[in-house]
Amino acid sequence: MERTNYHTHTKRCKHAGGTELDYVKAALEKKLSVLGFSDHAPYPDDRMGMRMDYAELKSYIEEVLRLKEQYRKELSILLGLEIEFDPREMDYYYQLKEEMGIEYLLLGQHAYIDKRGETINIYSLEQTKDTSHYLEYANSLKDAMKTGLFPVIAHPDVIFINQMPWDKNCEEACDRIVEAALLTNTILEFNGNGIRRGKIQYEDGVRYPYPHERFWEKVAKANGKTMINSDCHNPNHVWDACMEEAYQLAKKWGLQVVNRF
């Protein structure tokens, strides 16, 4: 089994530990063939939190590219960013890719823009009061996939971290995400960090916050492309027991796993 990970954070994002070099050393130790850096992308106005400052973006790019060259014979290192989709920021996405040399944008929709133009944090039950918001979240992923800018959708089922009962909105949201992924040939990420969070009691049983089995049953039935990533926030998590379990679950649930995009 080829070991790859395209979802890697560093201490720059303010909620992870380790430098870029620390992660490269860990990847070499764990015998990965590909290490993709995808720290949380800043915006020029430094909106949102838990991410690097915009002033750090240049040094982040320079350091990853330096390591990419230094270790080119031992490890394939890719320069990426994890970022939300905001339809008002299309110029910025193209700037990141075409002018700044970002090799891939990993879509991590921690918040979406609703019909009123307001930013809705999917982790906030004060804002996400019921499962109807899951439909808007799904639509935001669908719109993002249509742009062709995001080859992989990080933790597409992260909405199920919330304590809400499974209902028809959950079913419909999952169907919309899976259908859009198939139509746009987008890869859906099976996220190891959700497993790291551990199983807890939900209204629909004891489970991980994500990956959610009901979502991935739909992906498997549709034969959608799946990529297993660590979403590591610590060098020790580049490849750990949770990644091993992720691969075991993916096999058990019948997922079509890919390692390249």
Image (cartoon, helix red, strand yellow):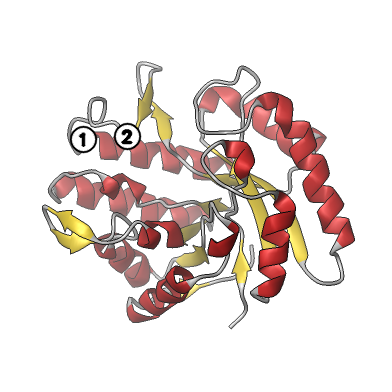
Q: What kind of element bears circle 1?
A: helix
Image quarter (top left, top right, bottom left or bottom right) of the N terminus:
bottom right
Q: Position of residue 229 (x, y in %)?
A: 52, 62
Q: What kind of element bears circle 2?
A: helix
Other residues around mark 1 within 10 Å, as few (<14) / some (14–19) / many (≥20) = some
Q: Position of residue 233 (x, y in %)?
A: 53, 51
On screen, residue 119 above or below 176: above
The answer to which of 143 and 192 lies nearer the viewer is: 192
| In this rendering, position of residue 45 left or right of residue 124 | right
Q: Residue at x 73, y 49 (%)?
A: 103
Residue highlighted by disc 1: 132
Q: Residue at x 63, y 38 (%)?
A: 12
Image quarter (top left, top right, bottom left or bottom right) of the C terminus:
bottom right
Mark 1 touching mark 2, by CB under 8 A? yes
Q: Which mark is residue 226?
A: none
Amino acid under disc 2: Glu
Residue highlighted by disc 2: 136
The answer to which of 12 and 252 lies nearer the viewer is: 12
Q: Position of residue 257 (x, y in %)?
A: 50, 73
